[in-house]
Image (cartoon, rainbow, N blue to C red):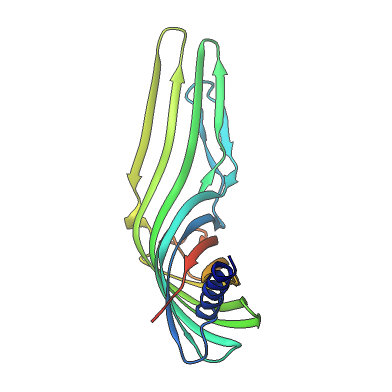
Amino acid sequence: MKKMMMIAAMMVATLSANAQFEPGTFSIQPKLGGTISWLSNMPKLSGISTLSGKNVELDKAPIAGVVIGAEAEYQLSNMFSLAAGLNYSMQGSGWSDYDEKVGDYKLELKDTKIQLGYVTIPVVANIYLFKGFAVKGGVQFGFLTNANMKFNAKVNDKDTSFTKDYDESIKSNCEKFDLSIPVGVSYQVPTVPVVIDCRYNIGLSKVNKGDGDKMKNNVIQLTVGYKFAL
């Protein structure tokens, strides 16, 4: 039993040592997580109802997405490191759901959103305030891969129902390059090199083309990664 306890203690000590990433070392961190995003200066969605003829206005709402990628980090000192990543990030913005009933007819409008996809390259500096905990900031370059306007519409009456999923590309109306400032914090678990990272990406560049309101990306990003020494 004592021998088994000693082996277990040695394994824990080895994991802890490997998780510390001494100055002068490189590491790579595959990561997966989620996003909550919205577009600043995006107008409310308005139109005339086909049922009642009245004006309808939908409020803005954030949408959820996925982010996946990897990050390479160089540990310059115990307190400071530099990192660069390559990710695919789902972003965009949405509007509130709407339903209306006139006589035997009912209209439901759901999941109305602008969905954007970017390949992003974040470059950040990490300052370790204490072991495993870092604050970070830097710059992120984004390259648009897809942009779609989506919604789900459902019409019911007493005899029939009709559902339509609308999905149309609006990529030609969007700028291909996006610049943002990522700021956040991360925490590395003491015994294993698992990193929990939370960032807020503040959009600097305009998403939409033309002379309209300057819509910019705002993204809250939460990921979990595993660091490997190189």
Front residue (pair 125, 141): 125
Depicted 197 relative to depicted 79: above or below: above
Return the x and y of residue 81 as percentages of the image width and height. 53, 85
* Residue at image point 39% right, 20% down: 162
Location of residue 128 (image quadrant): bottom right
Front residue (pair 154, 198): 198
Residue 214 visible in rendering: no
Judged from this view, the residue extending furthest toward the top is 159
Location of residue 152 (image quadrant): top left
Residue 223 visible in rendering: yes
Return the x and y of residue 214 as percentages of the image width and height. 51, 62
Instruction: Locate residue 169 relative to residue 23 in the image: left or right.
Output: left
Return the x and y of residue 199 as percentages of the image width and height. 57, 67
Location of residue 167 (image quadrant): top left
Judged from this view, the residue extending furthest toward the right is 130
* Residue at image point 51% right, 56% down: 35
Q: On the rendered image, what quadrant is the C terminus found in?
A: bottom left
Instruction: Locate residue 149 relative to residue 96 in the image: left or right.
Output: left
Front residue (pair 64, 20): 20
* Residue at image point 61% right, 87% down: 79
Depicted 230 relative to depicted 121: above or below: below
